[in-house]
């Protein structure tokens, strides 16, 4: 009986750890996706190909 109870405790502990690791992985993926989205949104440039030729550089 004692071995069975230990088995149940260990099983519950393994399930708890797996759940925590799953949650940590989810948070990691979420942060990565947020960084990727922010980089894509903030990194957009305006096309100025026509304006470059019309103005000279400042001294």
Image (cartoon, rainbow, N blue to C red):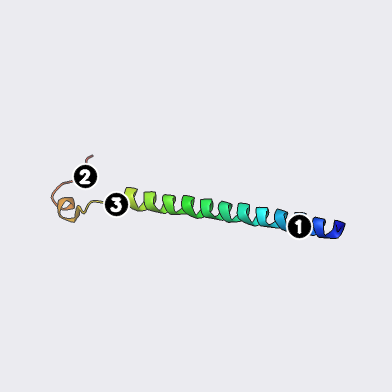
Disc 1 from disc 2: Cα separation: 75 Å
Element at label 3: loop
Q: Residue at x 21, y 54 (%)?
A: 47
Q: Mark 2 or mark 3: which is in front?
A: 3
Residue to which mark 3 is pinned = 44
Please, is residue 55 above or below residue 10 in the view?
Answer: above
Q: Is residue 44 left or right of residue 22?
A: left
Viewer-side residue, 46 vs 20: 20
The residue under label 1 is: 8
Nearest to viewer (mark 1 / mark 2): 1
Label located before the other in sequence (1 or 3): 1
Badge 1: residue crowd in 10 Å (few <14, some 14–19, many ≥20):
few
Quadrant where the image shows the C terminus = top left
Splitting the image into 4 quarters, where does residue 25 fall? bottom right
Which residue in the structure is indicated by mark 2? 57
Q: Is residue 38 left or right of residue 5?
A: left
């Amino acid at each position: 009986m004692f071995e069975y109870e230990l088995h149940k405790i260990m099983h519950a502990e393994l399930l708890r750890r797996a759940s925590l690791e799953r949650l940590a992985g989810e948070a990691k993926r979420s942060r990565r996706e947020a960084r990727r989205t922010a980089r894509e949104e903030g990194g957009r440039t305006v096309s100025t190909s026509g304006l470059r030729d019309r103005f000279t550089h400042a001294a």
